[in-house]
Image (cartoon, rainbow, N blue to C red):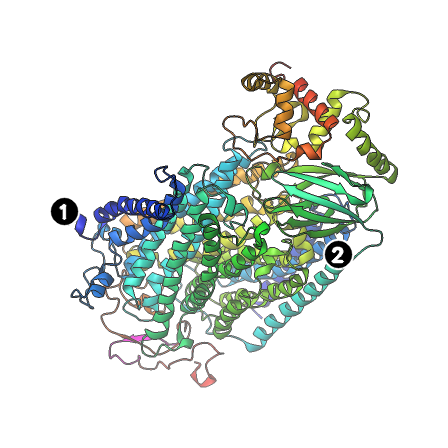
């Protein structure tokens, strides 16, 4: 290819070229508008105004350059397009993972690797935070950098790791689980992925701005955020790109799950992982526009001088928090429900038992979605909002414990009288149950208003969120990755290293976040670069544990990379699981199924003689197998042996 | 019959673990001191939550660990578990019991909430103003005294009216158990009845910017007589810059003002033991003031006074304008500012020089 052709074809060359062009566009646009308004300082280079426009233009230009929109542009201008063009489908070399690809399996891997990249960055920031907090006083970073570190740490972990890594895992396995050849909208799927790195790079790049990274927490409460230095803009706009990615993916999942299930795959025969992704996507589609709105308000206040949050000009500071939490509380479930799905798959498969109370497991997901929208103000018990709202929010918050308890008890019921294989995914699932129960208990405590008043905004909250988001969500992510590693890579991971990883994470996780409960109740506020002398001992213990906890992640990283390259070959169904993704080769063929599967029973009929979940092609169900109903009690006595 | 014995053992272990767990969580000294009437009911509620949590956690752990112990696969074990799909009765039980528990806890929480927030007889109003990065207080019922120190009378109920001048802050005294945000454009309230003499930290609990972690002051709870003396001293201090209260020692008087005004939240000063890092260090102030005063063509005393009263007039290189509140000239009396200027130039002779 000639150089000129390289710059014309979709890819990194064109993307690299598009960035300076977008910056130029922003400069010209801002200057031109200012000239039209007769602004004097036309040639005083006001990089804040230009920077704001560039922050919107450059990521879009990058997406155009890399080729996310080529098909649609061709279609829009009337160029010939091939609807069944599969040239960008599948991967034959590692280079294909750096291109716009429409294969859900490639996109799934792209998601997982990218999100783990940001997980590592966010983790390194956590290490710096703990280094600074090892002793009282200022040692490594000044207070402004410190505030930037915990803000970017949380933003990366939430928007660039937990939410999208679940989207990545589901991207890989959900179409396979429902017997679909791909997602409903493969090109939208590719766009969803490529929006993510732009958001992540933006958030990290904020450190290089004058005044430092955005330093107002991941909550970006106004009016601190509307008055903060330019770095704040990187969060305000970065969240829009991450949010757009989430919404597009969620729509894609909803359409895929509703319209592309294999013949015979009724809703009550879907694996709970699919149920979890379905309910999560509902949450994303309904809630995410609210955080987009809250950040647009901040953006307009900052860039155009509106007064949404200027109290002296009639703005309402509390409104920000209501709109923000109307997304960000459901976001907690966006970060947890997919994990619930993974745990159901892992426990059922590795304990060789049907999921206990399948229908209640699905209904409890739906109950959490609905109740999840009625509790947002429990983050605002001390915000100064009208006081009567606190009691109803306390009651709804505590009621969420009921469907959540149903899930915990049902997993225990699934373990009971199973044949439990203590594989790495199973150990992470059991670790998850332990940690999540503790996180749920501290959640109940926080829901009780008189207890929340003294402990809100303290390290008790930091402990709680890490118990539910690390001990909860991240443990399910590890469980899921170990569980589906053979399917995704066609190789087995090292079981011994996996177990070492589990035990080190489990022990040092608790030593890191357990003591935070104590310092929090004792009066240490969160988000502080410095603290009172009395908390020094426990903070030193927390920091040392945190460093060891951080190191334990290297074992996981080594295991994943080494096993992916040199691990023993895995066959199609190493766990002897029933769900459809395990009935194809590892990794699956490019269009998933050479023959269309037909679903004939529930996904977890372990122990039911001869039961199968799906059959392929025009094969009939094996002789003697009766299509068992999924869930809803034991099969009728006549079917039992 | 085969499984009865291990199950019995597990149940016994669970009961013992529950007892030990409850003993441990109750033995832990969780809270700071109980310095207000709200402390006791909140701490009791917290203890009740702990006591209920322990058996829930032990139950989950027992079933999980027992399952791993009793139902673990042997090497090469290819069996499947029992094809149990559910048990409606059991599912009804584990929906109903948690529902009853959380409903009861919510009701208990509501009762405690009403109790600690109830209006009390003879409440005194104190206005609290938050700004980056200091608290100030005024006492409209004590002749409008303005102070940078919060001083309360033991057993006298107070209602705080809390405002913010700039961004969100949060007025929190851990030993009182109560906190609420200071919200621009709103006045928020909390009621407190301090019932223990002592000094307690006032902490900002809502991220408010670069100096958030050092936005700390002290609340002193005094007996009635001491409180009344303090009120009287406040008028005196405005007259003589706090000299009489300090027994005529200018350094002591200055240090008291420095602490009480919250200067240490942003400025490092060895003599006052402060380590704030938002504004310039003051240990070397005498030399710095001499240098900048020369540039400005004023005396070092005038320079320091100007830096307190009109901080934007001269901004020390490498620091941002607007970080320091501009209203200390109205919060402190001229005599108090005199004391503070003298104090800073006396102790600010450089950490090495001392």
Distance from disc 2 to disc 1, alpha carbons, whole Å, reads: 73 Å
Where does the image place residue B135, in percent across and percent down from the top left?
Answer: 67, 40
Instruction: Report the front residue among A618 and A352.
Output: A618
Outermost residue toward the bottom in this view: A638
Stretch of the chain drawn in magenta: A609-621
State which quarter of the image contains the C terminus of chain A: bottom left
Magenta stretch, main secondary structure, is loop
- Relative placement, left or right, of B69 versus A22 is right
Whether residue B132 is situated above or below residue A613 in the rendered picture: above
- Relative placement, left or right, of A54 versus A413 is left
SS at badge 2: loop
Residue A107 in view here: yes
Where does the image place residue A10, in percent across and percent down from the top left?
Answer: 21, 53
The disc placed on residue A214 is: none
**Which chain is disc 1 placed on?**
A
Where does the image place residue B341, in percent across and percent down from the top left?
Answer: 68, 23
- Relative placement, left or right, of B204 versus A287 is right
Q: Residues within 10 Å of mark 2 (few under 14, many from 20)?
A: some
Residue position for label 2: B117
Residue position for label 1: A4
Task: Give the quarter of the image for residue A41.
Answer: top left
SS at badge 1: helix
Outermost residue toward the top in this view: B353
């Amino acid at each position: 290819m000639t150089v000129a052709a390289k710059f014309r074809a979709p890819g990194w060359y064109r993307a690299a070229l598009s960035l300076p062009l977008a910056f130029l566009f922003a400069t010209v646009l801002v200057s031109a508008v200012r000239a039209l308004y007769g602004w004097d300082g036309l040639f005083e280079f006001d990089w804040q105004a230009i920077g704001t426009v560039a922050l919107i233009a450059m990521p879009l230009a990058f997406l155009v350059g890399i080729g996310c929109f080529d098909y649609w542009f061709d279609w829009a201008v009337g160029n010939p397009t091939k609807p069944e063009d599969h040239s960008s489908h599948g991967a034959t070399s590692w280079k294909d993972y750096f291109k716009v690809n429409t294969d859900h399996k490639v996109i799934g891997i792209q998601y997982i690797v990218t999100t783990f990249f940001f997980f590592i960055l966010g983790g390194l920031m956590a290490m710096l935070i703990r280094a600074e907090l090892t002793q009282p006083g200022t040692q490594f970073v000044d207070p402004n950098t410190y505030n930037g570190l915990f803000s970017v740490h949380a933003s990366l972990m939430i928007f660039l790791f937990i939410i999208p890594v679940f989207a990545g895992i589901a991207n890989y396995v959900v179409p396979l689980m429902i017997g679909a050849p791909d997602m409903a909208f493969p090109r939208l799927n590719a766009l969803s992925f490529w929006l993510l790195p732009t958001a992540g790079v933006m958030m990290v790049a904020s450190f290089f701005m004058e005044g430092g990274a955005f330093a107002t927490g991941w909550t970006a409460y106004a009016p601190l955020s509307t008055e903060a230095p330019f770095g704040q803009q990187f969060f305000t706009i970065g969240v829009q790109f991450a949010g757009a990615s989430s919404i597009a993916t969620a729509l894609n999942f909803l359409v895929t799950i509703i319209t592309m299930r294999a013949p015979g795959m009724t809703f009550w025969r879907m694996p709970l992982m699919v149920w979890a992704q379905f309910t999560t996507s509902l949450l994303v589609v309904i809630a995410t526009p609210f955080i987009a709105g809250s950040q647009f308000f901040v953006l307009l206040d900052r860039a155009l001088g509106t007064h949404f949050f200027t109290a002296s000009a009639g703005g309402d500071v509390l409104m920000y928090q209501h709109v923000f939490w109307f997304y960000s509380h459901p976001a907690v479930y966006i970060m947890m429900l997919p994990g619930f799905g993974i745990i159901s798959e892992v426990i059922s498969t590795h304990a060789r038992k049907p999921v206990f109370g399948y229908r209640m497991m699905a209904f409890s997901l739906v109950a959490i979605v609905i109740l999840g929208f009625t509790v947002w103000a429990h983050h605002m018990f001390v915000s100064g909002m009208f006081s009567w709202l606190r009691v109803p929010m306390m009651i709804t918050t505590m009621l969420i414990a009921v469907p959540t308890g149903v899930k915990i008890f049902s997993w225990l019921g699934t373990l009971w009288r199973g044949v439990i294989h203590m594989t790495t995914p199973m150990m992470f699932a059991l670790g998850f149950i332990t940690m999540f129960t503790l996180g749920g208990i501290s959640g109940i405590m926080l829901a009780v208003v008189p207890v929340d008043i003294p402990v809100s905004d303290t390290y008790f909250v930091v402990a709680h969120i890490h118990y539910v988001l690390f001990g909860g969500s991240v443990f399910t992510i590890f469980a899921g990755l170990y569980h589906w590693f053979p399917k995704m890579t066609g190789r087995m991971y090292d079981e011994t290293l996996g177990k070492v990883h589990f035990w080190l994470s489990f022990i040092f996780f608790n030593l890191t976040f357990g003591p935070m409960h104590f310092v929090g109740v004792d009066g240490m506020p969160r988000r502080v670069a410095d603290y009172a002398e009395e908390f020094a001992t426990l903070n030193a213990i927390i920091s040392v544990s945190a460093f060891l906890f951080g190191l334990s992640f290297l074992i996981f990283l080594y295991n994943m990379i080494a096993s992916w390259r040199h691990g023993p070959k895995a066959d199609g169904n190493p766990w002897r699981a029933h769900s459809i993704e395990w009935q194809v080769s590892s990794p699956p063929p490019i269009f998933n199924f050479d023959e269309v599967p037909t679903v004939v029973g529930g996904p977890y009929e372990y122990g039911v003689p001869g039961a199968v979940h799906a059959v392929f092609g025009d094969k009939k169900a094996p002789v003697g197998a009766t299509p068992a109903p999924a869930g809803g009690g034991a099969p009728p006595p006549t079917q039992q042996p | 019959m085969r499984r009865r014995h291990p199950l019995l053992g597990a149940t016994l272990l669970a009961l013992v673990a529950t007892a030990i767990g409850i003993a441990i969580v109750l033995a832990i000294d969780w809270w700071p001191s109980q310095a207000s009437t709200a402390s006791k009911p909140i701490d009791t509620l917290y203890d009740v939550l702990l006591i209920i949590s322990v058996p829930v956690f032990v139950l989950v752990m027992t079933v999980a660990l027992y399952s791993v112990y009793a139902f673990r696969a042997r090497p090469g074990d290819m069996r499947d578990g029992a094809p149990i799909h559910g048990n409606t009765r059991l599912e009804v039980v584990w929906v109903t019991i948690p529902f009853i528990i959380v409903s009861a806890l919510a009701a208990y929480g509501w009762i405690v909430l009403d109790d600690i927030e109830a209006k009390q007889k003879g409440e005194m109003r104190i206005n609290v103003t938050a700004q980056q990065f200091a608290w100030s207080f005024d006492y409209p019922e004590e002749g409008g005294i303005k102070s940078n120190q919060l001083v309360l009378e033991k057993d006298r109920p107070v209602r705080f009216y809390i405002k913010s001048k700039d961004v969100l802050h949060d007025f929190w005294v851990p030993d009182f158990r109560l906190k609420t945000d200071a919200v621009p454009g709103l006045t928020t309230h909390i009621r407190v009845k301090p019932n223990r003499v002592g000094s307690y930290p006032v902490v900002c609990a809502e991220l408010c910017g670069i100096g958030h972690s050092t936005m700390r002051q002290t609340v002193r709870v005094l007996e009635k007589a001491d409180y009344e003396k303090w009120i009287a001293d406040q008028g005196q201090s405005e007259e003589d810059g706090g000299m009489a209260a300090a027994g005529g020692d200018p350094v002591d008087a200055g240090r008291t003002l420095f602490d009480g005004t919250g200067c240490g939240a942003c400025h490092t000063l060895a003599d006052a033991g402060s380590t704030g890092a938002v504004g310039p260090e003051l240990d070397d102030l005498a030399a710095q003031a001499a240098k900048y005063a020369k540039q400005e063509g004023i005396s070092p005393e005038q320079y320091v006074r100007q830096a307190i009263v009109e901080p934007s007039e001269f901004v020390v290189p490498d620091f941002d304008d607007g970080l320091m509140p501009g209203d200390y000239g109205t919060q402190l009396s001229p005599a108090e500012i005199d004391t503070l200027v003298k104090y800073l130039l006396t102790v600010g002779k450089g950490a090495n020089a001392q």
